[in-house]
Image (cartoon, helix red, strand yellow):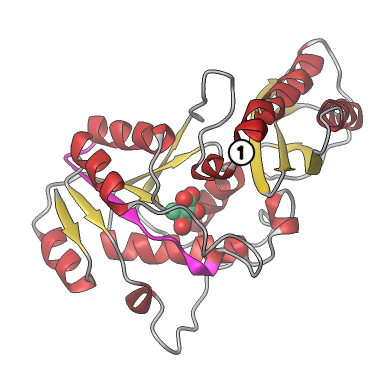
């Protein structure tokens, strides 16, 4: 496992790396969800690179940049065990040198869901991912469907800016009780953790209504909100059901739709989503 901490070293190493090169960008504190992305890249690519960088540009004021969980030794051990070839650990000073002033903004797709509540977040994500893509120069890059809006935004950016990279979407990895794996689950108290699977359960309830024939998006959203509100202390930040490709609202459900929600469980913000093709 090569551990690369300077752009110069990455570039030198990259010049000799076998292709196709598969890339898994992360903010560290790796969990089963990340490892599934790594394993998929390992199965499909000659070289696998993982980056670990807690990106200050995508974390808003009052969010969790300082307390975001970090454990470099554990992350490197996971990478070793999963046959990663190189880990790219950019320094914030090299990523954002003084006077840094170039940003990537993917308009439209960032207007709903998390974009409404985290101003600047997706600009930060698109900017750092564009930089990481230029640095690592992968042929394929792997993203989890849990961050569904992020996945669509990266896909659009790659298309719009002619980046020759296949974006590979991987299914959300869940705990046995259904909770989506996330580094932020580490914030949950044991009591909160016991209730957290109510989020995916509420989304599944929404899916079930659609499967039973419900086509009015407002009724599906109301049913999911009702399920979430039944849990004491839960504040759904949003529950939305949108066209799964354009993230636009629908009067009646048809085609592929995404049902997504964000909730605060205590201090911890959890997101999740499910998709369904409505005939
Ligand atoms: O999904 C994440 O962990 C981050 O948003 C990403 C893609 C690594 C960019 O910082």
Going by the picture, which residue comes out furthest to the front? Answer: 190
On screen, residue 225 versus residue 175, left or right, reads right
Q: Which residues are magenta?
A: 45-57
State the residue at coordinates (30%, 53%): 72
State the residue at coordinates (81%, 29%): 231
Of residue 255 and residue 45, the one placed in the foreground of this image is 45
| Residue 184 in magenta stretch | no
The reply to whether residue 30 is in sight is yes
Q: Quadrant of residue 108?
A: bottom right
Q: What secondary structure is found at the residue carrying circle 1?
A: loop
In the image, residue 265 above or below residue 103: above
Would you name the residue on which mark 1 appears? 189
Coordinates of residue 195 in the picture (x, y in percent): 69, 28
Q: Dividing the image into 4 quarters, which one contains the C terminus? A: top right
On screen, residue 20 versus residue 140, left or right, reads left
State the residue at coordinates (82%, 38%): 233
Coordinates of residue 265 in the picture (x, y in percent): 71, 41
Of residue 226 and residue 21, the one placed in the foreground of this image is 226
Coordinates of residue 168 in the picture (x, y in percent): 41, 38
In the image, residue 71 above or below residue 102: above
- Local crowd size for mark 1, using a 10 Å CA cut-off: few (<14), some (14–19), many (≥20): few
Coordinates of residue 208 in the picture (x, y in percent): 76, 14
Q: Quadrant of residue 37?
A: top left
């Amino acid at each position: 496992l090569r551990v690369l901490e300077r752009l110069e070293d990455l570039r030198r190493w990259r010049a000799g790396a076998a292709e196709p090169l598969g890339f898994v960008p992360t903010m560290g504190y790796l969990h089963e969800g990340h490892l599934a992305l790594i394993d998929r890249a390992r199965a499909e690519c000659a070289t696998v690179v993982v980056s670990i960088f807690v990106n200050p540009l995508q974390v808003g004021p009052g969010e969790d940049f300082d307390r975001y969980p970090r454990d470099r030794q554990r992350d490197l051990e996971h990478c070793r065990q999963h046959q990663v070839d190189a880990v790219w650990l950019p320094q914030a000073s090299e990523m954002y040198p003084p006077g840094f002033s170039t940003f990537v903004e993917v308009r439209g797709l960032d207007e709903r869901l998390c974009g409404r509540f985290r101003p600047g977040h997706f600009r930060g994500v698109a900017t750092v991912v564009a930089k990481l893509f230029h640095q690592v120069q992968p042929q394929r890059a792997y993203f989890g469907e849990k961050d569904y809006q992020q996945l669509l935004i990266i896909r659009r950016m790659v298309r719009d800016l002619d980046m020759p990279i296949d974006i590979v979407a991987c299914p959300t990895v869940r705990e046995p009780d259904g909770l989506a794996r996330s580094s932020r689950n580490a914030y949950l108290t044991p009591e909160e953790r016991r209730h957290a699977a109510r989020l995916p359960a509420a989304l599944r309830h929404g899916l079930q209504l659609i499967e039973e024939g419900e086509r009015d998006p407002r009724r599906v959203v109301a049913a999911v909100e009702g399920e979430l509100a039944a849990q004491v202390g839960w504040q759904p930040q949003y529950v939305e059901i949108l066209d799964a490709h354009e993230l636009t609202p629908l009067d009646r459900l048809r085609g592929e739709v995404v049902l997504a929600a964000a909730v605060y469980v205590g201090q911890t913000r959890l997101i999740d989503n499910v998709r369904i093709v409505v005939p």
